[in-house]
Amino acid sequence: MISPAVVLDHVQKTYGQGAQAHTALQSVSLEVPAGEFLCLLGASGCGKSTLLHLIAGLEPPTSGSVSVPAGGAAMMFQDPALFPWLSVADNIGFPLARKGLGATAQKARVQELLAMVNLDGWGHRQPHELSGGMRQRVALARALAQDARVLLMDEPFAALDAMMRDRLHDEIERVWRETGLTIVFVTHNVREAARLADRVIVLASHPGRIAGEFSVKLPRPRRIDAPEVAQLSRTITDSLRSVLRGNDDAS
């Protein structure tokens, strides 16, 4: 049995106090085995991003516990958030410099990461010279530079057009295979989840909680327009609709 890389045990996250309190997550228990590609799926406001923030250590849980490997987790956001005054290479090397890596070792590692995300020869460029997809590749390389064994991705391709998103699906799947990372990927796109995941967790809202789970046994590599991906997407969508109806009935 593969040991879990991430463990959440009865996690609750509440913002505010008294009458102003808002529970974003309630009694969430989840284990993510090492090397799994897990997608968190749900409507806006169901706590997907909050869950990532807890795993990343950006916020503490109100109650319950969160366990991640030594070295923590790296995070990639929807906005690449690159430093505009730094080159591509210096953006990627920023976490390495903070760790005190020497200049020669840092340069070598940056070149490895540029090659890994198919940006060989672009290290001297500035972020404004890149397309949106290329900026997200730089953000991915910067996250990988942290050498964490868990990568958290918060709707990283949501702002991209369909063709670029499809290309980056291939890229992230390739990087995942090459590195053996554990990936927790937040999305509201059902097809994207079915395309990428080993397992899909469906979250309900108000408060955020686990409402369903789908193990994805489809062979890889997958195409987002493949009939079997479409069929799984329909099944998951039906589950989401049921969850949303339940939320409406409870409100």
Image: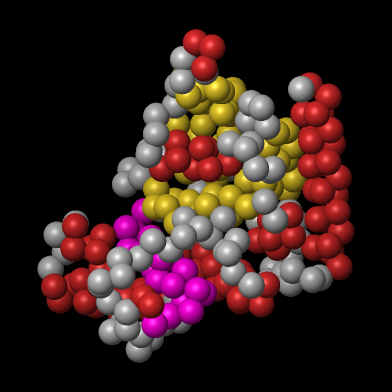
Say how many tags the image has. 0
Q: Residue furthest front?
A: 20
Figure colour scheme: secondary structure
Residue sitting at x 48%, y 51% = 152
Magenta-span inclusion, residue 246: no
- Is any part of residue 75 visible from this angle? yes
Q: Is residue 89 above or below residue 244?
A: below
Please state the extent of the stretch shown in magenta in the rendering: 129-148
Residue 12 placement (x, y as % from top left): 52, 23
Q: Is residue 127 left or right of residue 31?
A: left
Image coordinates for residue 158, horizontal then vertical, percent? 60, 61
Identify which residue is drawn at 25% across, 71% down.
85
Which residue shows up at 86% across the image and 45% down it? 238
Q: Which residue lies furthest to the top in this view?
A: 18
Image location of residue 15, percent across then percent down:
48, 24
In the shown orientation, is residue 147 left or right of residue 231?
Answer: left
Q: Residue at x 81, y 70 (%)?
A: 226
Depicted 51 relative to depicted 92: above or below: above
Whether residue 6 can be seen here: no
Q: In which quarter of the image is the C terminus?
A: top right
**Res. 99 image quadrant:** bottom left
- Point out the image quarter for the N terminus: top right
The secondary structure that most of the magenta stretch takes on is helix
| Location of residue 167 by image quarter | bottom right
**Figure check: 110 above or below 95:** below
Residue 136 is covered by the magenta coloring = yes
Judging depth in this view, the residue of 131 and 10 nearest the camera is 131
